[in-house]
Amino acid sequence: MENSKFDFLAQELDSLKAQGLYNAIRVLESAQGPWVSINGRRMLNLCANNYLGLITNEKIKESAKNAIDEFGVGAGAVRTIAGTLTLHEELEKKLALFKGAEDVILLQSGILANIATIPLVVGENDLIFSDELNHASIVDGCRLSKASIIRFRHLDMRDLNNKLEDYKDFSGRKLIVTDGVFSMDGDIALLPDIVEIANKYGAMTMVDDAHGEGVLGDHGRGILSHFHLEGKVDIDVGTLSKAFGVIGGYVAGTKVLIDYMRQRARPFLFSTPLSPADASALIAVTDLLKEDDSLVKKLWDNGNYIKSKFKTAGFNTGHSQTPITPVIIGDEKTTKEFSALLFEVGVFAQGIVAPTVPKGTARIRVMVSAAHSKEDIDFGVEKFIEVGKRLGVI
Ligand SMILES: *Cc1c(COP(=O)(O)O)cnc(C)c1O
């Protein structure tokens, strides 16, 4: 039967294709790791968030398997009815200790952690000051809150200060929210300045540490540890799906905030929590990070190694302060071609174009992990140089 109700979507799809913005989704036929199998070929993987290589760590897999044997495969209800297992509580306690926070609440993902939190602390008559490059999940949380959103220029503390000054007599609540590490450039929020400005104007502070978790700070404790700001940022949101390698999100903060979230955060109340295998794997990850920072060190070592190799070869790697390494090409079409040619020679590294990054700054975002060897990185850089020369990028 012809159904014309979705003609408007079909037209949208055609338009995306015409602009080269339609995503052909790559499918991995193997576990996520430094090398993966795609279309039957072994490829060097330079675009996953598996920073520490924990996805295939034997100890962590073992912990997930044991939890399945003991607790089965699902939680069976939302947390407030019958879905809270000892595993969830143990993970929350361990994360709170690891982060140096009073308390932690677990959500099902990073995006849900943002969506759960922001509408609880600001509403219709309040203001949000948001870095213009904040992640889409922060933006969605802000929109859901119905507060007025005031965007400040990326990392521009003078602009943030001026905007708060403009509203210094405003009687509602104010929230300053920022990514910790910005995922497309690898630069870091100026959190000490944000905290100072917030205190001056009586604003709450919130950071989304998705790319800082397991990467920044002592043993990968994140951005608050990096800046020695434990207890000084009101809301610390994170994901358990990047460096932690599993799935889930959390919010770390004061007892009052977390207690209130357990009563009112909608994804906590109305959606089933992480499975026993997920929660147990995450307990093992937290234990591992607490004991051993060698993977975090290896990640930074690899990040610095690949950056210096790219720079020597003449690539523009922007101003990253973290292992995230953008290879900025500029033109959208060349970037797509670059990624396709890399794929042909055995390197999986996706191009990132507008609107994810500003127009004219298209790039290949290179993500190394602690699981890559120097030989893996050498192979990848060699292929980048080959393709870069062929396309006249270097
Ligand atoms: C990846 C990311 C998220 C989403 O995390 P998920 O756990 O995958 O939902 C949220 N915020 C930022 C800044 C991210 O980079």
Image: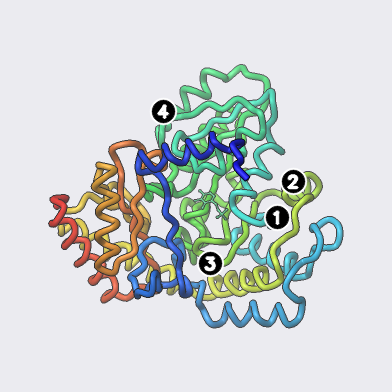
Q: Hey, what amino acid is under mark 4?
A: Arg
Secondary structure beneath label 3: loop
Reading the image, the residue beneath label 2 is 265
Give the image's coloring scheme.
Answer: rainbow
Reading the image, the residue beneath label 1 is 105
Q: Hey, what amino acid is under mark 1?
A: Ile
Q: Nearer the viewer, residue 374 or 362?
A: 362
Labels 3 and 4: the sequence-earlier one: 4
| Real-space CA distance between mark 2 and mark 3, rounded to the nearest whole angstrom | 25 Å
Reading the image, the residue beneath label 4 is 158
Q: Hey, what amino acid is under mark 2?
A: Ala
Q: Is mark 4 within 8 Å of ligand 1?
A: no
Q: Residues within 10 Å of mark 3 (few under 14, many from 20)?
A: many
- Look at the image and tell me in which quarter the N terminus lies: top right
Task: Residue 245: give its label.
Answer: 3
Q: Is mark 2 within 8 Å of ligand 1?
A: no
Q: Residues within 10 Å of mark 2 (few under 14, many from 20)?
A: many
Q: Hey, what amino acid is under mark 3?
A: Gly
| Real-space CA distance between mark 2 and mark 1, rounded to the nearest whole angstrom | 10 Å
Secondary structure beneath label 4: helix
Do the numbered discs 2 and 1 sit on residues whose CB atoms are within 8 Å?
yes
Secondary structure beneath label 1: strand
Point out residue 298 in the picture as x, y percentages from the top left corner: 38, 71
Residue at screen point 19% across, 67% down: 382
Mark nearest the camera among 3 and 4 is 3
| Real-space CA distance between mark 3 and mark 4, rounded to the nearest whole angstrom | 37 Å
Labels 3 and 1: the sequence-earlier one: 1
In the shown orientation, is residue 360 left or right of residue 30?
A: left
Residue 52 in which image quadrant? bottom left
Labels 2 and 3: the sequence-earlier one: 3
Point out residue 106 in the picture as x, y percentages from the top left corner: 69, 57
